[in-house]
Image (spheres, helix red, strand yellow):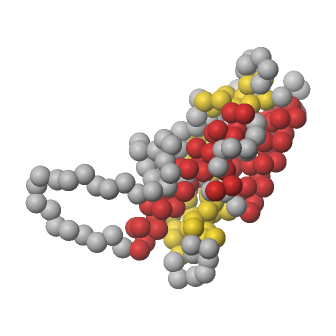
Amino acid sequence: MSISQASGTNRWLRRTVVAAMTLGVAVTGAGCGDGKDKKPEASTSPTVTRSVGPQASAKAEVLGVYRSYWDAQVRAYAKASPIGTGLEKYAFDKALGKAESELVALKLNGNVIKGEPKLSPKVTAVSLDESPKKATITDCVDVTDWRLLKEKTGAEVKLPKERLTRFVTTISARTVGDKWMIVETQQQDRTC
């Protein structure tokens, strides 16, 4: 593989990871989240009841969608196909188009991506006063354990050592109807 191919693969892998990002309620609680809120556990000590405001509720919902988006992307990239992964349930517009084009590139090159990235998302902005409602997520994506492999042999595709394996990504979400969806991901060329 030439340096220019490796560099292109590195950019592609980072963009792939960014595109794949988007959906879970909490880093430790994510897995195969379906975007539904979990009920809090009962406490034996007396507490003051606080109502969850619309901002907090929207943030939790957006993070849930983001985690589910990532779960769907991990499934899609592991087989180089969006079929049966549910990706279209969480990604829309540019985010869905980007993921689908990267899946086509994976398939054409006979590659898949296996493992899982580590995410640390935070909702940094929510606007509930507009239609559609909008939100911004900032994440530190770690792709150290998400590996580019040859689909037929399982051999790891060598990537440049100087590539970023942890990077900042900005994600845009908005409502489509009454459902939050990921609409765009932008990977930044800086580590986190």
- Counting from the top left corner in percent of width and height, residue 35 is at 49, 55
- Counting from the top left corner in percent of width and height, residue 114 is at 65, 29
Q: Compare residues 63 and 41 and report the one nearer the observer.
A: 41
- Counting from the top left corner in percent of width and height, residue 65 is at 54, 56
Left or right placement of residue 140 versus residue 176 in this view:
left
Assign the C terminus to one quadrant of the image.
top right
- Counting from the top left corner in percent of width and height, residue 170 is at 62, 57
- State whether residue 184 is above or below residue 118: below
Rendering quarter of residue 183: bottom right
Rendering quarter of residue 146: top right
Residue at 73% across / 44% down in the picture? 83
Is residue 161 in view?
yes
Residue at 87% across / 24% down in the picture? 1
Is residue 139 in view?
no
- State whether residue 31 is above or below residue 39: above
Residue at 64% across / 56% down in the picture? 89
**Furthest-front residue in this view:** 84
- State whether residue 128 is above or below residue 10: below
Residue at 36% across / 73% down in the picture? 53
Number of disc labels: 0
